[in-house]
Image: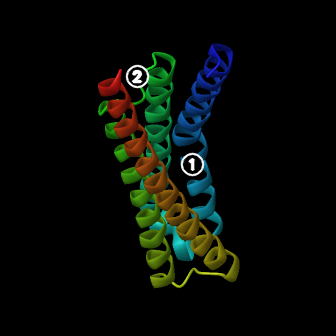
Amino acid sequence: MHPRVSRVLKALIILLLALLLASQTLVIPEVARITAIRNPDVAQLEVPGIIGAVVFIALIEVTLVCIWFLLSLVQEGRIFRVEAFRYVDIILGALIAAGAIILVSYIVIVGSRAVSLSLSLLAVLGIVVSAALALLVVVLRGLLRKALELEQDMSEVV
């Protein structure tokens, strides 16, 4: 990977992390507060909603940090090492946890009778996307394992 591409990706990760942190601290609590005021029938979901959204975004932040470390391994020419699997496994766990948060949040919303068709579609979309991304990471993890095996075989030959 060209060093310039890696630097641009890392700069974008820093920008994304800053925006996500601002969302966690400023946007989410304010949106939850306004929603609770405008819809008093679901005001009891304000705090659980904030917690769920902040944790969901934290999972995205964890994923971005793992991508940062994987990029560093690529830059150093060490991506085909066992340590790369730790970051891939964390990303996989974050995707599964994100899907679980979406599912639990949807169940809570259904239980409070605040569900709508658009919310149902978004929940299904979120669950399907998180499952698809998790399966993609599983495939990529398998490719990384195969590449690691091939590199080890090549180093034995040389």
Residue 51 drawn at (x, y percent): 42, 54
Q: Is residue 3 left or right of residue 62?
A: right
Quadrant position of the N terminus in the picture: top right
Q: Residue at x 58, y 34 (%)?
A: 22
Measure the C-alpha gap from mark 2 to mark 1: 38 Å
Q: Nearer the viewer, mark 2 or mark 1?
A: 2
Q: Is residue 66 left or right of residue 86?
A: right
The structure's colour scheme is rainbow
Residue 89 drawn at (x, y percent): 35, 46
User: Which disc is residue 28 wearing?
Assistant: 1
Q: Residue at x 41, y 66 (%)?
A: 100
The quadrant holding residue 122 is bottom right
What's under tag 2, amino acid-wise? Arg
Residue 108 drawn at (x, y percent): 44, 76
The residue tagged 2 is: 78
Q: Secondary structure at mark 1?
A: helix
